Image: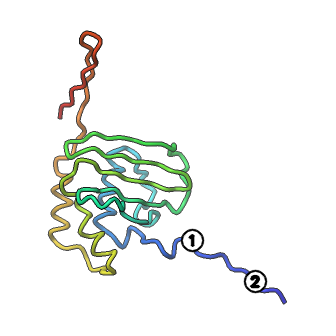
């Protein structure tokens, strides 16, 4: 008699964003800011935290996520936002992979939560973490870039 093979769970080793509420809210706000947040899509249920960047830089805010489904309408590639809090890059990869880079940030609100969770501490977010997230998006806006050409040299001026 042959053994019946069962389908392995692919995501049993990944951390659902429901377990990281600060990171989940951060990603929701970035997607809402980009205009890519579908109201029917439960981002916290469908995205998994894979890991943080391993570069070792203290100010690095790069995280790797995975959508449990492949992208339907989202094109592959990079979307860049220049904001008053720094530059955000969304790298949409194949098979639902997403790399979120937050450049030029001194403090990003999900760092302490990710450090706590990777140690196995799944306690509720602290008041300081909630306040950091709220303060971060309080005056969050895009910077406008203006390109002018002077004598064949292009000058880029960023305002905001």
Residue 5 drawn above or below residue 50? below
Q: Which residue is mark 2?
A: 4
User: In terms of image quadrants, where is residue 115?
Assistant: bottom left
Ranked by sequence position, the earlier of labels 2 and 1 is 2
Residue projecting furthest to the top = 151
Exactly how many numbered labels are in the figure?
Answer: 2
Check residue 10 in the rendering and tell me which mark sits there, or answer none.
1
Q: Residue at x 50, y 45 (%)?
A: 74
| Secondary structure of residue under mark 1 | loop
Crowding near the residue tagged with mark 1, few <14, some 14–19, many ≥20 C-alpha atoms within 10 Å: few
Q: Residue at x 36, y 46 (%)?
A: 89
Residue 134 in percent (x, y) is at 18, 58
Front in this rendered view, residue 58 or 36: 58
Compared across the picture, whether 48 is left or right of 87 comes to: right
Question: In which quadrant will I find the N terminus?
Answer: bottom right
Residue 5 in percent (x, y) is at 72, 80
Q: Residue at x 27, y 39 (%)?
A: 82
Q: Residue at x 45, y 57 (%)?
A: 41
Question: In which quadrant will I find the C terminus?
Answer: top left
User: In terms of image quadrants, where is residue 18?
Assistant: bottom left
Check residue 90 in the rendering and tell me which mark sits there, or answer none.
none
Front in this rendered view, residue 4 or 28: 4
The Cα atoms of the two marked residues, 2 and 1, are separated by 18 Å
């Amino acid at each position: 008699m042959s053994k019946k093979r069962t389908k392995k769970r692919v995501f049993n080793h990944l951390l659902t964003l429901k377990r990281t509420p600060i990171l989940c809210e951060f990603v929701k706000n970035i997607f809402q800011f980009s205009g890519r947040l579908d109201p029917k899509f439960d981002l916290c249920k469908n995205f998994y935290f894979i890991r943080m960047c391993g570069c070792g830089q203290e100010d690095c805010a790069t995280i790797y996520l995975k959508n449990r489904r492949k992208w339907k309408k989202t094109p592959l590639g990079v979307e860049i936002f220049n904001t008053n809090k720094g530059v955000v890059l969304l790298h949409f990869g194949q098979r639902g992979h997403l790399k979120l880079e937050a450049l030029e940030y001194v403090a990003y609100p999900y760092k302490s939560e990710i450090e706590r969770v990777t140690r196995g501490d799944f306690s509720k977010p602290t008041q300081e973490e909630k306040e950091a997230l709220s303060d971060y998006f309080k005056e969050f806006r895009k910077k406008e870039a203006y390109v002018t050409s002077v004598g064949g040299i292009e000058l880029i001026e960023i305002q905001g």
